[in-house]
Image (cartoon, rainbow, N blue to C red):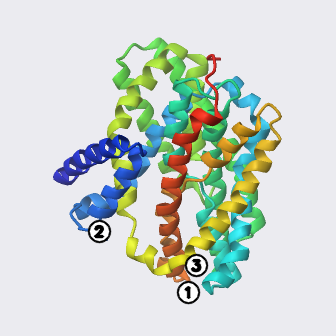
Amino acid sequence: MVLSITMIILAGIIADSLFKLIRLPGLLGMLLVGIIAGPKGLNIISPVLIGVSLELRQLALIVILLRAGLQMRGDTIKKVGKTALLMCFLPATFECIGITLIAPSMLGITRLEGAILGAILGAVSPAVVVPYMIELTERNRGTAKGIPSLIMASASIDDVYVIVLFTSLMNMYFDIGQSVFLSVASIPISIIIGVFLGFIIGTILCWFFKNFHMRDTTKVLIITGLAVLIISSEALLKNIIPVSGLLSIMTIGAVILERYEILARRLSAKYSKVWVAAEILLFVLVGAQVDITIALDIGIKGVVVIFGGLAFRSLGTFISVYTAKQFNWKERLFCVLAYLPKATVQAAIGSIPLAAGVEAGSIILAVAVLAILITAPIGAIAIKYTENILLEDDVPL
């Protein structure tokens, strides 16, 4: 496994550099390395590493969410509060509805199977989006109107909403009898509890770090360890009380920034260094989950479904940001483009319907894989090459 990790990091660094050299986002090179080296490619990644890839991807996601929280000021979130709330639900809902309408006739599946596919495709990828938003924040681009913070905060809740919706639709398919209304009602509860939990932990950490001296590296280990415990507890408590672990983790970072800004700056620098390795592991292992042959089998019909869903999603995103009167049309367009990429959630849950015995499971998986291959590059390139045109440099808040 150690050899595989070494190979992944070295190949990831080379691919990242090569893709940046040809003016493409480095994450595309990392995804490509994973596709080529993964079980469905040359199969040179250790099976042991593949077996723990979910945990490693979660750890990398924790790092990027903590980095995001350490960049998010409370006053900025308040400024975009209403818009952020709409961004959490409207784009995913529109996309799910669009795919539910389009997929049955295009792919020959039932309406409910189309809805399940829509729920899988409805999630934006924080792993793709958040690093770019952090970079924008660090360069003070779009920060005066809170655009990076808006997208970072909305993306995490978007995933919570979509996963709950997916679980409810799967229960309907197998007639488990769980009420969709109760499932959807759990979403605001999980958000409130998640934010509250993050606030309490963040407050305690600030007090602890102010009163007990230790190295910043030790603080990073403590915070990361608590974040892992939160994610683990979320899975254990899901049938008892809903908790949004992603929001808890981001809130911890935001509370530290609000109450202990000097420390937040130092921790952010530490996590930036950790992210160098974590980013490679995340995107290479996401790529390793992709079976490109399945994606090719679905053909042009799958592409039509994906772009049809993106059209509905873009409409939902535009309606959400239209309510923010401080945004001009360029900034609204940027938000629409930044909300396109898909990767982590689709890689994580795309195969569940097939494994669970859904009749159209192979088709759903194929479209999910194809969505990663299409939207992750398109979204990443769109963000990278439109930020200079659509956003303005700002004075730090």
Front position in the image: 345 or 308: 308
Residue named by callout 3: 301
The kind of residue tagged 2 is: Pro
At horizontal 39% and vertical 71% (from top left) the residue drawn is 292
The kind of residue tagged 1 is: Glu
Q: In the structure shown, which secondary structural element does the residue marked by tag 1 occupy?
A: loop
Mark drawn on residue 359: 1
Is residue 322 shown left or right of residue 374? right
Front position in the image: 203 or 354: 354
Residue named by callout 2: 39
In this view, the mark in front (1 or 2): 2
Tell me residue 4's x, y (percent). 20, 54
Is residue 152 shown left or right of residue 35? right
The kind of residue tagged 3 is: Lys
**Quarter of the image with the C terminus in it:** top right
In this rendering, is residue 209 above or below 195? above
In this view, the mark in front (1 or 3): 3
Tell me residue 320's x, y (percent). 77, 47
The reply to whether residue 52 is in sight is: no
Using the rendered view, name the quadrant where residue 31 is placed. Answer: bottom left
Who comes first in sequence, dot 2 or dot 3?
2
The reply to whether residue 121 is in sight is: yes
At horizontal 65% and vertical 42% (from top left) the residue drawn is 334
Tell me residue 50's x, y (percent). 30, 61
Tell me how far mark 1 sits from mark 2, CA to CA.
Answer: 24 Å
**Quarter of the image with the N terminus in it:** bottom left
